[in-house]
Amino acid sequence: MLLKEILSAVAIALTLIGFYPYLRGIIRGTTKPHVFSWVIWGATTFVVFLAQLQAGGGIAVWPIGISGSITILIAIIAYIKRSDITITRTDWLFFSAAMSSLPLWYATSDPTWAVVALTFVDLLGFGPTLKKVYTNPYSESLGFYGLFATRNTLVVMALENYSVATLLFPAAVAIACIFIILLIIYKRRSRAG
C-alpha cells in the first residue's frame, strides 16, 4: 500500500510540475493551447475522477482530480489570453460530439459506462490539438505531454483496484500523449529537413 501512495504522490508532483511551465507559457504567449480541447479535457477529467472514486480507484485517482481542476483553469486562462480561439467547423464537430456523450454519466449511474463514455469524449478533445500540432508543431510543449504520459503510467501502477472504470482513462490518455509526442517530433523534423 505504501508503494501505491508513493506512486500517487509522484504522479501528483508530476501533475503540478507539468502544468506550471505550461501555464507560464500560456501567460507569456509562447504556448497557445486550443481552448475547445482544454474545456473538453477539464470537464471529462473531473467527472472521470468522480467515477473512479466511486469505482474504488483509491489514492491513485487523486492526480486525475487535481489535473481536472487545473485543466479547467488552463481553459479559462487560454480563453482570457486568446491563445487559440480559432474555431472551425471541425472543432465544433469535435466539441459537439464530446458534449453529447456527457449525459451518459447521469443516465447510466454506472462508473464503468461513465468512464468508457468520458474517455471517448476526452480522446475526442485531442482532435483540435492534433489538428493544430499537425499545422504548427511548435505551438505545443513536447515536455508537457511527456510528463503527462509518465504521470498517467504512474496512476495506472498506483491503482488500488484494477477495472475498466479505473484503468481505461489513465491508460488511454497516456497513449494519446505519446501519440501527440510522436506527431510533434515527426512534424518538427519534417519542417527542419
Image: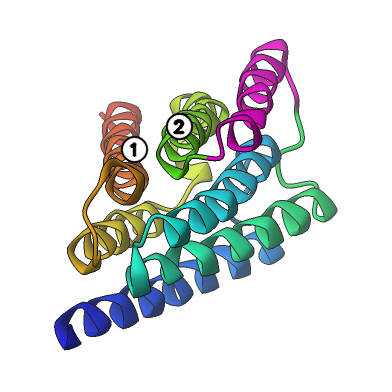
On the image, the x and y values in percent for residue 50 come to: 54, 57
Task: Write down the region rendered in magenta.
Answer: 87-109
Whether residue 99 is in magenta: the answer is yes
Viewer-proximal residue among 46 and 161:
161
Callout 2 amino acid: Leu
Magenta portion: prevailing SS class:
helix
Quadrant of residue 39 within the rendered picture: top right
For this view, does 39 lie left or right of residue 3?
Answer: right
Q: Residue at x 63, y 30 (%)?
A: 107
Residue tagged by mark 1? 176
Image quarter where the C terminus lies is top left
Residue tagged by mark 2? 123
Whether residue 180 is in magenta: the answer is no
Q: State how far apart marks 2 and 1 are (Cα).
A: 7 Å
Callout 1 amino acid: Ala
Quadrant of residue 98 within the rendered picture: top right
Q: Earlier in the sequence, mark 2 or mark 1?
A: 2
